[in-house]
Image (cartoon, rainbow, N blue to C red):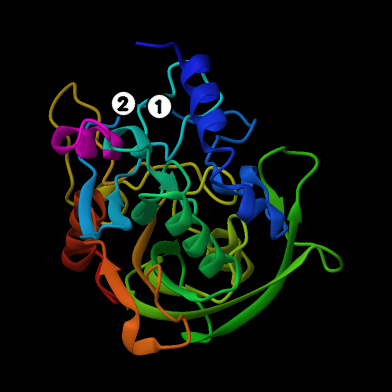
Amino acid sequence: MRDGAAARAGYRDGMSGRISAYESGGERWEDLTDDEPKVPRTRRLRRCNLPVDVLLESERFVVVSKPSGLLTVPGRRPGDIDTVVARVHELWRASDASAATPVICHRLDRDTSGCLVLARDREAARELMTRFRQRHVEKTYLALVIGAPYPPEGEIEFRVAPDRRRPGTMWTPRRGGKACQDAYETVEVFRAVSLVRVRPRTGRTHEVRLALKTLGTPCAIDPLYGSTEPLLLSAWKRSYRTGRGREERPLIDRLTLHAESISFAPPGADPEDRAAWVRAEAPLPKDLTSTLRQFRKHAAPGSL
């Protein structure tokens, strides 16, 4: 097997022609990768053993459910070759040994779970990337956040720009940068935390995470824009006791963000014809599902 550097170079070289149309629209290849920012990590990265589930598939594209902890494409670190692209390619090659390498059409950060779109060929990739660039895509995200937004639903506008002090991260300047617009609604409220759905109108790097931070309700765990502390059941369940000599296991210890759904016109369809759009929805992963179950049981509003 090739080492990490060779795999990354091979992938980018092979994709250079496929993304040329996207780059000509003013976007950059870096906007489609999920390399980790050059900031200290708060926990050791674990190998992701969770599967990549296919949510929607056609002859031109596929929508998968990306598990948290898995890179979309090879990153900068040696050994970052276990990726969504590699796993989907392996699935395709199981039925067709000559299957082309999938082309990623947008990005999700390593620790974000949920819907991700990959194209099967160059023309499909070009059309789908154009959909994203021209905002002919609708996405929803679910986030477990600190506090609760006020008002409980609405729209928020802000600006983002690269943070030169922390490469790979963004910040929200008062002037300059790029405009963002997001709609949000509070789905469920617990003590000190809540579940919020966000519908980004634009598609900037880390937009949803920064929208939540701007609202004053950052993701409950967000190493870049919020807290790095894991969520522990003992913070809500007074009677909680660990076994002798055992440490408490977190309810969840990763970025509390999930790409819930995505809708778009498939390649060859008119994006203005909403009847032609397709939709995929990724079920909440086990860690978020179990965390919400514990909150409903022990952190209901007014409970002690």
Name the residue carrying label 1. 45
Rendered location of residue 87, percent (x, y): 28, 35
- For the image, the number of numbered tags is 2
Magenta span: predominant SS is: helix
Front in this rendered view, residue 15 or 260: 15
- Residue 39 screen position, x and y as percent: 63, 32
Q: Residue at x 45, y 36 (%)?
A: 73
Please determine whether, in this image, residue 186 is positioned above or below residue 62.
below
Residue 241 vs residue 267: left or right?
Answer: left
The residue that appears at 71% across and 72% down in the rendered structure is: 158
> Type of residue at label 1?
Leu
Q: Which residues are magenta?
A: 88-98
User: Observer-nearest residue: 64 or 111?
Assistant: 64
Residue at horizontal 25 percent and vertical 28 percent from the top: 247
Residue 54 placement (x, y as % from top left) = 21, 52
Magenta region includes residue 19: no
The Cα atoms of the two marked residues, 1 and 2, are separated by 7 Å
* Residue 285 percent coordinates (x, y): 23, 53
Q: Closer to us: mark 1 or mark 2?
A: 2
Vertical position of residue 28 compared to residue 183: above or below? above
Q: Is residue 16 above or below residue 117?
A: above
Query: Label 2: which residue?
Result: 47
Direction from residue 222 to residue 242 in the image, left or right = left
Identify residue type, mark 2: Arg
